[in-house]
Amino acid sequence: MLMLLALVFTLTLSAKPKIRIIATGGTIAGVSASATSSAYGAGQVGIQTLIDAVPQIKELADVSGEQLVNIGSQDMNDAVWLKLAKRINQLLSGDYDGVLVTHGTDTMEETAYFLSLTVHSDKPVILVGSMRPSTAISADGPANLYNGVAALVDPSSKGHGVMACMNNQLIDAKSLIKTHTTDCATFKGTYGEMGYVYNGKPYYIFEPTYKHTTRSIFNVDNLEKLPKVGIIYGYANCSTLPIEAFFKADFDGIVLAGVGDGNFYKDVFDVAVQMQESGTQIVRASRVPTGPTCLNGEVDDSKYHFVAALNLNPQKARVLLQLALTKTRDWQQIQKYFQEY
Ligand code: DGL
């Protein structure tokens, strides 16, 4: 009996964290014409090949994988987001200790933010991608995958919400932004990186103050689709054709990627006012990469019932507006969500 107890005790101690890798495609699964060619196709290689390419992760965790889709993330869509969030919630409500998502970098920041609002667990969820295809000289995917797993299995990673692990950095979902079209160091945190991975261990510098994961009220369990929200890019002498098309298509929400502090060309602004009056929620964001889009700055948001995006860029403001519209059409309540999430 004592021998049996000792064996169980030993097995329990030596049991590695159980993690699941969900693959969605991207350059990390990309294949180039040759090891030196910059031309490649994303989403070509399957999850088992990615796992087998980094055998060292098996020393860190009990790793298994599944292929959700195999796409370039420019083709990421609401249906995949909903499936991904539901699957992660299912895995984390079971005996998995964390989930890693391999993903293209083009829309990684949007998917990460969507998951930070819809995954209801304090277990870690980490997105990993790469800027060079799996077949390239000095491919960055394998190191990102190893660092992602190393962060995922560390007890200190619990409760930080959804994050990305790229180029040794750990960046929280809300501030994650792709800043360069080709650089391996492309991802930055709008307010700095939340942490970093060094010598196979994560080190956290700060905690996000916004609501995420277990503190989020947004739930996808009974959702089969998301509200229609479009983005209008602002510029000098901006045409009204795009926003008029969204108006005709009866979109539920519009994010204005405005100039400066979320300002818009007068003709477009006038259509936005009409849309708000007709029941479409307008959110003012900015094409400027840093700094908040402030409430009641040059635009009297209270007068028009517009919402200011505050610390969200246009593509993330769209994500929050989609989920907010599953809860309410009240512009003041939506503005409150933008202050909290
Ligand atoms: N097609 C892009 C994507 O899947 C490639 C960018 C990348 O993954 O680094 O996001």
Image: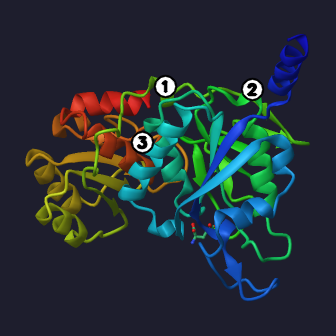
Q: Is residue 212 in view?
A: no
Residue that numbered label 3 is attached to: 293
Q: Residue furthest bottom?
A: 33
Q: Nearer the viewer, residue 258 or 123?
A: 123
User: Which quadrant is home to the N terminus?
Assistant: top right
Secondary structure type for disc 1? helix
Residue 25 in percent (x, y) is at 58, 66
Q: Are marks 2 and 1 in contact (CB under 8 Å)?
A: no
* Ligand 1 within 8 Å of the CB at mark 3: no
27 or 178: nearer the eye? 27
Q: Is residue 116 left or right of residue 13?
A: left
Sequence-first tag of 2 and 1: 2
The secondary structure type at the circle numbered 2 is helix
Residue named by callout 2: 156
Marks 3 and 2 sit apart, C-alpha to C-alpha, by 33 Å
Q: Which residue is mark 1?
A: 214
Residue at x-position 25% and y-position 71% = 239
